[in-house]
Structures are given as structure tokens and as C-alpha cells.
Amino acid sequence: MIGMDSIGTRVVPGPLAEPLKYGVYTGVELDLQTDDAVPAAACLGLEPPRFCGQCGRRMVVQIVPDGWGARCSRHGTIDSVELGRR
């Protein structure tokens, strides 16, 4: 949901901001996603999110030696360092 900050500027939620509407590993709406849809590597924390949790679009993901970065064309970027995942 798009909100407003304290000075009236529109705030767009990031790709992994709660509440998520889409599965970040499948791109399927969470209401329709089955429990076994998430890959095993993702459950183990070895796979970065590939889809935006807000719109379900495929994100551009770059793997770097110390983590990963992902960018949604609509909802911005997220880095594994921001989430505390390495």
C-alpha cells in the first residue's frame, strides 16, 4: 500500500516490505501459493529472492561475494546487508 510520510511525500514500500502480497521465490500470490512451492535452497537461506513481494514482478538480482542485491522496477532496491543476511 502506498502511504505518505510526515511531509506529504508518497512512500512506496520496498520489494520485501511487510505485508507481502506475492511469494518472493515464486512470484505467485501468497493466497494461491502452496507450501511446497518454495525451493529447498530458499528454505535453507541459500537463494536470494527473485520476485518482488509487492507486485510479483521478476527482480534483477546480482550475487556478490558477500551477499546479493535485488531491484524491482516499481518498488526499488534491497540488499542482503539491509536484511542482515550474508
Image (cartoon, rainbow, N blue to C red):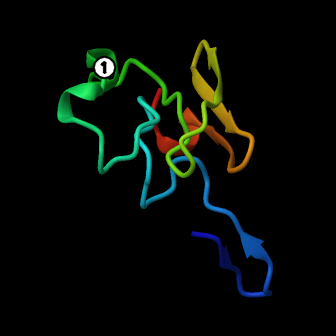
> Could you tell me residue 15's position as x and y percent?
58, 47
Q: Residues within 10 Å of mark 1 (few under 14, many from 20)?
A: few
- Residue in the picture at 48% in, 25% down: 48
Quadrant that contains the N terminus: bottom right
Query: Element type at marker 1?
Result: loop
In the displayed structure image, the side of residue 59 where residue 26 appears, left or right: left
Number of numbered labels in the structure image: 1
Residue closer to the observer: 23 or 79: 23
The amino acid at mark 1 is Pro
Instruction: Give the residue at mark 1.
Output: 39
Q: Is residue 66 above or below residue 35?
A: above
| Residue at the extreme left of the image, as rendered | 35
Q: Is residue 55 above or below residue 69?
A: below
Q: Is residue 31 above or below residue 81?
A: below
Q: Quadrant of residue 33?
A: top left
- Residue in the picture at 56% in, 44% down: 82
| Residue at the extreme top of the image, as rendered | 65
- Residue in the picture at 59% in, 24% down: 68
In the displayed structure image, the side of residue 68 where residue 25 appears, left or right: left
In the displayed structure image, the side of residue 11 where residue 35 appears, left or right: left
Q: Is residue 54 above or below residue 56?
A: below
Residue closer to the observer: 28 or 41: 28
Q: Quadrant of residue 6?
A: bottom right
- Residue in the picture at 30% in, 27% down: 38
> Could you tell me residue 30's position as x and y percent?
34, 47
> Could you tell me residue 56's position as x and y percent?
53, 41
Residue closer to the observer: 73 or 34: 34
| Residue at the extreme front of the image, as rendered | 32
